[in-house]
Amino acid sequence: MERLRLAFSGALAAALAMATGHLLAALTAPSASPVLAVGSAVIDLTPTPVKEWAVAHFGTADKAVLVGGVLLVTLVVAVLAGLLSRRHPWVGPALFLSLGALSGLAALSRPVVSAADLVPALVATVTGLATFAVLTRLARRERGSGAVTRRGFLLGSLGAAASTVALLAVARAQATGQAVRRLVLPRPASPAGPLPVGLETTSRVSRRCGPRSTPSTASTPTSPSPMSTPRCGR
């Protein structure tokens, strides 16, 4: 059970780190998100035949598949970090530092970069290291007593999972708002001409009188009285 808790600790720490970096990138530069930056770097380094194969098999979903692959590899490395930290406590932090350095280098490899593009990777690395240290400490057995802090580990895991979901929700809302604000309708090639003269009067009369009904030929025609005929022409 301790190995399972350590593996789960690594996965939760990596998920919270990626969510934190993604939210900071959504507030500053979306392309600086650790996951997206690594995915873009992988695309740039991928040979052209492999790119063509991915487009032919996945179509427009090729980028989503790539991002999913980056997430999967990151979680696998984080799980290994948790498992290896049982016998070698330094291995876990070293792997998280390696993941953070990789995301930072990927952010710097973009065509247009600034010092602010490193902030999501740095904050994500610090968040991952802190979460990993707390959860792995709760996952291990207490010295001397041999008891397992199940309640503490459960509360810590739930807190990390809830924080991850909340950060991703805020990041998604922020990205949607930015996309809406960037949406600009194109100007018409030629402006519309003026409305025909008398159109407003005709519309007002139509609304007041309503649609005219055609009398049925099967019914007996009757002569309408002058009092019941609405004078819509005025």
Image (cartoon, helix red, strand yellow):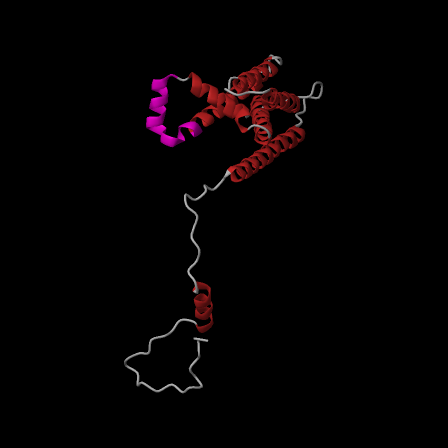
Count of numbered marks: 0
Q: Which x, y percent locates residue 119? A: 61, 22
Q: Which x, y percent locates residue 74? A: 51, 22
Q: Is residue 74 above or below residue 192?
A: above
Q: Quadrant of residue 116?
A: top right
Assign the N terminus to one quadrant of the image: top right
Residue at 37% over, 21% down: 51
Q: Quadrant of residue 145?
A: top right
State the residue in front, 141 or 233: 233
As for residue 59 lying within the magenta part, the answer is yes
Q: Is residue 114 above or below residue 208?
A: above
Q: Which x, y percent locates residue 23? A: 59, 31
Q: Which x, y percent locates residue 4? A: 56, 24
Prevailing SS of the magenta stretch: helix
Residue at 40% over, 28% down: 62
As for residue 218 lying within the magenta part, the answer is no
Residue at 43% over, 21% down: 43
Q: Say left or right for 31 vs 60.
A: right
State the residue in front, 99 or 104: 104
For the magenta stretch, what is the residue range?
47-64
